[in-house]
Amino acid sequence: MALNDVEKKVDKILKKGQEGSVIAPVRMERDSKFCFACHPGVPCFTDCCRNMNIILTPYDIVRLKNRLGLTSDAFLHLYAQPELLGITMVPVARLKMLEDQGGRCPFVTPDGCQVYSDRPVCCRYYPIGLASLRQQEKGAGEEEEFFFLVKEPHCKGFEEPTEWTVESWRGDQEADLYDRMNREWMELLLRKKSFGEETELPEKARKLFYMVSTNTEKFKSYVFESRFLDTYIVSEETQKKILEDDVALMQFGFEYLKHAIFGADSDVIAIRKEIRDKEVKKILKRRKKQRAKLARLKKGRL
């Protein structure tokens, strides 16, 4: 299930079990069992691969664009479109469906998925959904994850005899790897959500967030071909890693966004002292001017 669908529906449906919902209103743990299989012999094979709102995580984009031998620019142009995610209003990339072909996924054929080993995380999880109580309960303590079934009426895969536990399904689908790769990105979304709907990211910050989280080539140029390294301290070891490895670059990008947009401390990046001191002086000078202006306005009213 797409991330924004989970965000909007899980709390309401899991507790109330609305009639006609595609989510079975049953909380599942890692040892919970279910029957499911999807293969060309199932009558509804590939029917679910259309008219879906699939939000691509940064790791999804890295895997898919490398699988297809494309740059991030080319992949985003051909297969994605930007949108603001739910109540977070954070810019993300959504997979473009082929509207002129019944809204089918661009990677699916009658024989199945052409990018199956590199398919997006929401495709891997299906028919299991993941939710977190910390996303739903403001001020909650430790995060508690739980699972639920996404059971669409047309799906015949649930009639297959193959039995899974949530844990064995996750292992078969490489969900742990994708969760690990996406965790820092999800935490960025949660940071923004904690600010509330009324707090919007400035346009410059939104553009930066989208570029860093979707376009590894542009972010690499931003780091190595601008004054980035004159502004931030980044170890030589980290520089070498992000030059050679898209995944390392993606993870470095999460740290940068956490620091640059949300003001959080980072172990891998820090603003240089002279730059910080210069910025502090600018702020103090601006405040001094504002106070002087306010004093003049008050004096004029007396």
Image: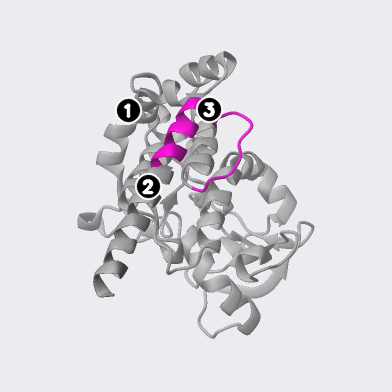
The answer to whether marks 3 and 2 mark residues whose Cβ atoms lie closer than 8 Å is: no
Asked if residue 49 lies in the magenta stretch, the reply is: no
Which of the two residues, 32 or 2, is positioned nearer the viewer here? 2
Amino acid type for the residue under numbered disc 3 = Lys
Q: Is residue 54 above or below residue 207?
A: below
Q: Position of residue 46 (x, y in %)?
A: 42, 54
Q: Earlier in the sequence, mark 3 or mark 2?
A: 2
Q: Which segment is the magenta one? A: 262-282
Q: Report helix, strand or loop for mark 2.
A: helix
Does residue 279 show up magenta in the picture?
Answer: yes
**Viewport quadrant of the C terminus:** bottom left
Q: CA distance from mark 2 to mark 1?
A: 23 Å
The residue pinned by badge 1 equals 71
From mark 3 to mark 2, how far is it between C-alphas? 22 Å
Q: Residue at x 31, y 51 (%)?
A: 203
- Residues at marks 2 and 1 touching, judged by CB atoms closer than 8 Å: no
Q: Who's the residue at 54% across and 26% down the image?
A: 248
Asked whether residue 1 is in view, the answer is no
Distance between mark 1 and mark 3 Cα atoms: 35 Å
- Disc 3 residue crowd, few under 14, some 14–19, many 20+, Cα 10 Å: few
Among the 4 quarters of the image, the one containing residue 298: bottom left
Left or right placement of residue 56 versus residue 172 in this view: left
The three-letter amino acid code for the residue at tag 1 is: Thr
Please tell me which residue is depicted at 52% across the width and 62% down the height of the picture. Answer: 193
Q: Can you say whether 206 is above or below 72 in the image? A: below
Q: Residues within 10 Å of mark 2 (few under 14, many from 20)?
A: some
Disc 2 designates what residue?
205
